[in-house]
Structures are given as structure tokens and as C-alpha cells.
Image (cartoon, rainbow, N blue to C red):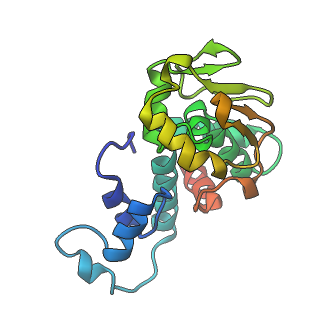
Amino acid sequence: MASYHGPKAKKQRRFGEVLIPRPKYQRILENRAYPPGDHGRDKQFRSGRRSDYGLQLDEKQKLAFIYNIRDRQMRNYFVKARKMQGNTGDNFLAMLERRLDNLVYRAGFAATIWAARQLVSHGHIEVNGRRLDIASYLAVPGDVISVREKMRKNPHVLESIEQGSAYAPGYLDVNAEQFSATFTHIPERGEIPVPVDEQLVVEYYTRLT
């Protein structure tokens, strides 16, 4: 699955749940509680057990959508996670959560992961005082992520901080006034707010190796 740039609400309707916690997506899924397409209304009434592979594939695609990354990148993270000590699923999610673009989003500096990716790739983010434009950079505890001075008056950044910084996860110490966030520790599963069964994703990639 490539990086997704199409209608975000349509993609979430396909999965049947809100994956990006924004009010407008919540409203859309409440008003259109059925998959997109000409026969979407009929599909909501269909029953039947999905295959194990179908369930695994759905969870993998949900995860790729949430973090906005390509399947090849996902597979590489899985390979690394499997070589680490501990639970593979937990390690897998923790690595995705440590990505710089995701941390910019979680800190509230951007309204969505797509906006966060743009901030990073355009060079508007610093890590430990140095400009870094690599979205896949994996933060380590103690890293200080901040918005560069020239972007601190940007209305989109200001609006995002006002609305989102209060909901930052426990592994980020956000200083909204300084436009900065400190990555304090590797997140545990309970601190990662993604509605995905990572074990199914692990099973999906395990069957391919």
C-alpha cells in the first residue's frame, strides 16, 4: 500500500471506523455508516466471517494508513522488530510511533500525519536544535523536537497546537509556548493511540516470510 493522498473520509468509511480522530471524520462516518461506492449501503447489511488473511490484510492496511507509510517500509520495520527482544507487535508499533513525522503530529504541531510529513520534509522541524527533514527518523529518549522560528506564526501550526497539544501521549513532554516537545521514553502499547490489532499485522508479515 503506497502513501495515501486521496479522500481521508472515504478510506475510513471502507474500514468502517474513525482512524483519524478529527470531528469532521466522526461526523461523516456517523452520517454515512456504510462503505463507499454504488452498493455501499447494501454492504453494511452483509454478514459472514472474514478469512484470517482478510482480517490480517485489513489491519495491515489500517496501520499503513494511520502512519502514512508504504508497504515496503512497513515490512522493513517488521523485520527489525522481530529481531528485537520482547513482543514483536509492541516493538513494531513503538518503532512506527517514534518516526519524526508521527511525533510532530502527536505533539500537536500539525493537524494530521500528512500535514506533519509536509512540515518535516519542507525543513520546518528541528531535532535537538538542528534542522531535520527526514520523516522516517526514529527519535531516541531525550530528543527535543521543535518547530523552527519562521513557522511559529503560521496559522495552521498555531491552530493545531491550540487544539491538539493538550492530547499529546505520555511519552511526549510538550511545551506549547516554546513550540517544542521532548521525547521522554520508548512508548508502551497502552500509550499508543491506534485502533489496530498489531498481532494480526505480525501474522500477516510472518506468513510472507
Q: Residue at x 67, y 45 (%)?
A: 92
Q: Residue at x 71, y 43 (%)?
A: 82
The percent coordinates of residue 70 (x first, y second) are: 45, 38
User: Does the image show residue 70?
Assistant: no
168 and 80: which one is in front? 168
Q: Residue at x 55, y 55 (%)?
A: 204
The percent coordinates of residue 136 (x first, y second) are: 56, 28
User: Does the image show residue 3?
Assistant: yes
183 and 201: which one is in front? 183
Image height check: is 144 above or below 94? above
Find the residue positioned furthest to the top.
130
Q: Answer with left or right where residue 56 lies relative to residue 27.
A: right
Instruction: Count the labels in the image.
Output: 0
Q: Answer with left or right where residue 173 lies relative to residue 31.
A: right
Question: In the rendered image, which quarter is residue 184 located in?
Answer: top right
Q: Answer with left or right where residue 186 lies relative to residue 208.
A: right
187 and 126: which one is in front? 126
Question: In the rendered image, which quarter is residue 12 located in?
Answer: bottom left
Quadrant occupied by the C terminus: top right
Q: Residue at x 57, y 39 (%)?
A: 102
Find the residue positioned furthest to the left.
38
The percent coordinates of residue 11 (x first, y second) are: 35, 58
Question: In the rendered image, which quarter is residue 201 located in?
Answer: bottom right
Image height check: is 205 above or below 37? above
Q: Answer with left or right where residue 113 lies relative to residue 126.
A: left
Quadrant occupied by the N terminus: top left
The percent coordinates of residue 33 (x first, y second) are: 35, 76
